[in-house]
């Protein structure tokens, strides 16, 4: 189960985490490497969207277009749905509060599509304000924080909820503590950034914040018209990227 709540300005995680990878694994993307040529309206993606519309009717909770990032967690733990796209948060809550459900749970990688297997993992950055009165101290703190001793200990406390950012940590013994978390070890190998195959720039962020890709899916399942919905999405992306 996933959710496709359209144009929700509050939550910006789970819907994109499904919609972008499904787009990529079926051969479509926002723009080409030139950052202008929109490659969203592709026949293979239209076919994939038709399959998704049918799957939504056959297997999904059709109220998912109105869900936020917490609805699927609650539905899963209430045994109203049997599978969902999520980080490990449902598992950790179940271990604490509903051990019988946790015992029966497991995780798996996204299925591979015709174009491959992909995840929308995003990126993280740190910055120091130029007008800060403590630039030197801030710089030294960041150097210290990212030393193996400090950072690795903090990272291990999350037991897989926070994915590793280096190949070295993919081999860390932490991953061997719970076999049900093994799938998360491999996720970074399949990561892409928003705006792919273009740069993750301000245009990609605008398309993300306007929910163009997510709204395309929502329109498709609500209307039943995959082709028209993807054509709409492509036009919206052209307005953003100038293609």
Image: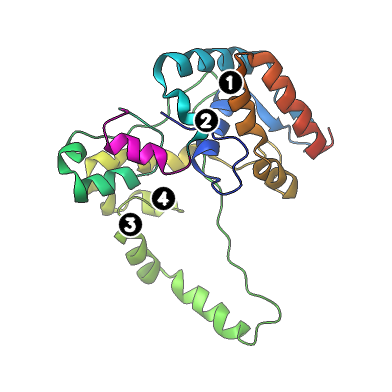
Q: Earlier in the sequence, mark 1 or mark 4?
A: 4
Q: Is residue 89 left or right of residue 131?
A: left
Residue 20 to residue 188: above or below: above
Image point 68% across, 20% down: which residue? 229
Q: What whole-number distance in Å separates the C-alpha atoms at marks 2 and 3?
A: 30 Å
Q: Secondary structure at mark 4?
A: loop
- Identify the disc placed on residue 163: 4
Residues in magenta, as a range = 68-81
From the viewer's side, name the closer residue of 19 and 243: 19
Q: Earlier in the sequence, mark 3 or mark 1?
A: 3
Q: What whole-number distance in Å separates the C-alpha atoms at marks 1 and 4?
A: 34 Å
Q: What whole-number distance in Å separates the C-alpha atoms at marks 4 and 2?
A: 28 Å
- Identify the disc placed on residue 65: 2
Q: What whole-number distance in Å separates the C-alpha atoms at marks 1 and 2?
A: 9 Å
- Identify the disc placed on residue 165: none
The residue singled out by tag 3 in the image is 158
Where residue 179 sits, quadrant-wise, is top left
Q: Earlier in the sequence, mark 4 or mark 2?
A: 2
- For the question of whether residue 228 can be seen, the reply is yes
Q: Is residue 72 left or right of residue 182?
A: right
Q: What whole-number distance in Å separates the C-alpha atoms at marks 3 and 1?
A: 38 Å
Q: Nearer the viewer, mark 3 or mark 1?
A: 1
Image point 66% across, 45% down: which residue? 209
Q: Nearer the viewer, mark 2 or mark 3?
A: 2
- Identify the disc placed on residue 222: 1
Image point 27% across, 48% down: which residue? 93
Mark 1 burial class by Cα count in 10 Å: few <14, some 14-19, many 20+: some
Q: Are marks 1 and 2 in contact (CB under 8 Å)?
A: yes
Mark 3 burial class by Cα count in 10 Å: few <14, some 14-19, many 20+: few
């Amino acid at each position: 189960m996933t959710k496709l709540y359209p144009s929700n300005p509050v939550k910006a995680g789970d819907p994109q985490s499904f919609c972008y990878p499904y787009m990529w694994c079926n051969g479509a993307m926002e723009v080409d490497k030139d950052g202008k040529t929109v490659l969203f309206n592709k026949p293979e993606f239209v076919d994939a969207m038709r399959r998704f519309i049918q799957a939504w009717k056959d297997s999904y909770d059709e109220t998912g277009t109105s869900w936020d990032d917490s609805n699927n967690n609650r539905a899963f733990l209430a045994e109203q749905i049997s599978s969902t796209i999520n980080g490990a948060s449902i598992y950790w809550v179940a271990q604490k509060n509903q051990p019988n459900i946790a015992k029966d749970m497991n995780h798996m990688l996204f299925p591979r599509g015709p174009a491959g297997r992909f995840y929308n993992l995003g990126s993280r950055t740190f910055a120091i304000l130029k007008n800060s009165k403590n630039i030197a101290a801030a710089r030294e703190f960041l150097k210290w924080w990212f030393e193996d001793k400090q950072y690795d200990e903090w990272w291990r406390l999350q037991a897989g909820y926070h994915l590793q950012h280096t190949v070295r940590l993919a081999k860390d013994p932490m991953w061997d503590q719970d076999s049900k978390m093994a799938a998360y070890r491999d996720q970074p190998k399949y990561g892409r950034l928003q705006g792919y195959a273009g740069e993750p720039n301000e245009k990609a962020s605008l398309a993300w914040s306007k929910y163009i890709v997510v709204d395309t899916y929502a329109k498709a399942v609500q209307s039943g018209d995959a082709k028209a919905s993807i054509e709409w999405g492509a036009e919206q992306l052209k307005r953003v990227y100038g293609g």
